[in-house]
Image (cartoon, rainbow, N blue to C red):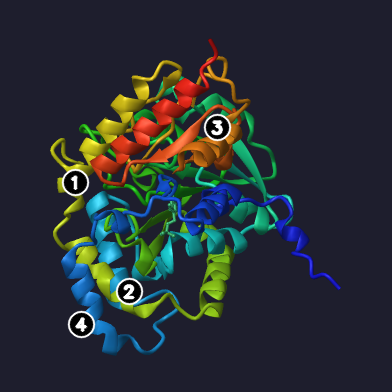
């Protein structure tokens, strides 16, 4: 008898590590050197985590042998609580903070604790696809609202509002955004807060890139802009602190907690069932949040991240047929391909052929649940030399496929 995967997984996908990624691994096993521009994983590209974080984990490893509280270590949650205070998020108590094995675990947990079959959650298109899959896996229905490329990828709020139904329970915001690099305007964030308030929706705000901001961009935490709305804000060590492998993240409940007693009970139940987040990493959270914020040096105009973002942006946008909104935050560009200018049929064919012919791996825009099939996401973490090599290959590939 063949064992079949669960029907719950039937329509789920995660293309960042999907079939094209498998193909890249196959090519590598055949001896090809693939340039991997598909995953936002800073440390392997020389963006080391701050030393003090690594030091804390090493120093505390003996103290970290036992389980912690299911919500997380007191010191870690105290540090997150202090962070909310510096951000201006009101009335967060220590019991409102949950530490997880990365934001990923907490996203799934937050959805599983809330959703009944058919409950709807509004998710941006394009999105970070874990949101869509977590909602679907939890029995909910992800409903995508459009982010508008011509408005610097800010959400189209008319579209968002039109998609609210009696089954809608919440709105997901990813700000700064993966994959577009958008950092939402203050008025947009405030209007989303008003919409949630008017319709009694929960706000889920994924702010994992909140310190990765370029060219003076300002990040506005939506939890500072609501009055009587439940906000669930997510942050972690993976990006701001370049420690993705340590798997450390947090989730902060704020706002109308008094109307969410049962939901919070559900969150606590699921957090208890998985006992606790890995404890060595929890010891690093206080130092990460309270220590020297070296990410700020990397995003300055002279910083490596900023320079590499500009490099990829300049090279891509100099190719006729490729256009791109310049990122204001995060680690990605989300360029548009003019499909009339080249002889591949869509983003999937572009990504597959680029990998097969030139050994450069990027991710198709549709992998981020984008409604159009003419974008791709590219990571700018490798060294400038490697990025230039990748750009040479992309240029060569596009010229070879240009329609005369
Ligand atoms: N949210 C967004 C927007 C992300 O881009 C990522 C990872 O790329 C995550 C969450 C998951 O982060 P973590 O490593 O904390 O699980």
Who comes first in sequence, dot 1 or dot 2? 2
Q: Which mark is residue 59?
A: 4
Q: Height in image: 39 above or below 65?
A: above
Say whether marks 1 and 2 touch (CB < 8 Å): no
Please give the label number shown on residue 298.
1
Q: Is residue 364 visible?
A: no
Q: Earlier in the sequence, mark 3 or mark 1?
A: 1
Give the Cα separation between the discs numbered 4 and 3: 47 Å
- Residue 178: quarter of image: top left
Q: Is residue 10 left or right of residue 263?
A: right
- Regarding mark 1 in the picture, which secondary structure is present there? helix
Question: What residue is shown with label 3?
Answer: 350
Q: Secondary structure at mark 3?
A: helix
Quarter of the picture containing the N terminus is bottom right
Q: CA distance from mark 3 to mark 1?
A: 31 Å
Q: Quadrant of residue 108?
A: bottom right
* 155 to 361, vertically: above or below: above
Left or right, 279 with respect to 25, comes to left
Quarter of the figure with residue 399: top left
Disc 2: which residue: 282
Q: What secondary structure is marked by label 2?
A: helix
Whether 109 is drawn above or below 70: the answer is above
CA gap between label 3 and label 2 equals 41 Å
Q: CA distance from mark 4 to mark 2?
A: 12 Å
Camera-side residue of 139 and 44: 44
Distance of label 1 from label 2 (alpha carbons): 24 Å
């Amino acid at each position: 008898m063949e064992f079949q995967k669960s029907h719950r997984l039937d329509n789920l996908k995660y293309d960042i590590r999907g079939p094209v990624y498998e193909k890249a691994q196959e090519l590598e096993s055949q001896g090809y050197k693939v340039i991997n521009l598909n995953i936002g994983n800073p440390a392997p590209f020389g963006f080391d985590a701050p030393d003090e974080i690594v030091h804390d984990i090493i120093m505390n490893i003996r103290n970290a042998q036992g389980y912690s509280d299911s919500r997380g270590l007191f010191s870690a949650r105290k540090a997150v609580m202090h962070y909310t205070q510096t951000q201006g998020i009101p009335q967060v108590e220590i019991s409102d903070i949950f530490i997880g094995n990365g934001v990923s675990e907490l996203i799934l947990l937050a959805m599983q604790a809330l959703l009944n079959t058919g409950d709807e959650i509004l998710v941006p298109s394009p999105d970070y696809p874990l949101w869509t899959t977590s909602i679907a896996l939890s029995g909910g229905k992800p409903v995508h609202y459009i982010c508008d490329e011509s408005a610097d990828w800010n959400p189209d709020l008319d579209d968002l509002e039109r998609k609210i139904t009696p089954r809608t329970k919440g709105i997901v915001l990813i700000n700064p955004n993966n994959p577009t690099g958008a950092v939402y305007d203050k008025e947009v964030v405030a209007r989303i807060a008003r919409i949630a308030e008017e319709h009694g929706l929960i706000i889920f705000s994924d702010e994992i890139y909140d310190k990765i901001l370029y060219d003076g961009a300002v990040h506005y935490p939506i939890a500072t802009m609501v009055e009587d709305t439940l906000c669930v804000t997510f942050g972690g060590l993976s990006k701001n602190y370049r420690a993705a492998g340590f798997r450390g993240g947090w989730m902060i409940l704020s706002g109308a907690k008094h109307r969410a007693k049962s939901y919070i009970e559900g969150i606590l139940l699921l957090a208890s069932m998985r006992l606790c987040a890995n404890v060595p990493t929890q010891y690093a959270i206080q130092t990460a949040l309270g220590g020297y914020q070296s990410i700020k040096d990397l995003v300055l105009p002279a910083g490596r991240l900023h320079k590499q973002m500009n490099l990829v942006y300049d090279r891509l946008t100099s190719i006729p047929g490729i256009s791109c909104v310049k990122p204001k935050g995060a680690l990605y560009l989300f360029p548009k391909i003019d499909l009339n200018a080249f002889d591949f049929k869509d983003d999937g064919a572009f990504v597959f052929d680029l990998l097969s012919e030139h050994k450069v791996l990027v991710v198709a825009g549709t992998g981020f649940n984008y409604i159009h099939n003419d974008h791709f996401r590219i990571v700018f973490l490798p060294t400038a030399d490697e990025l230039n090599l990748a750009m040479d290959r992309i240029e060569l590939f596009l010229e070879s496929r240009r329609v005369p």
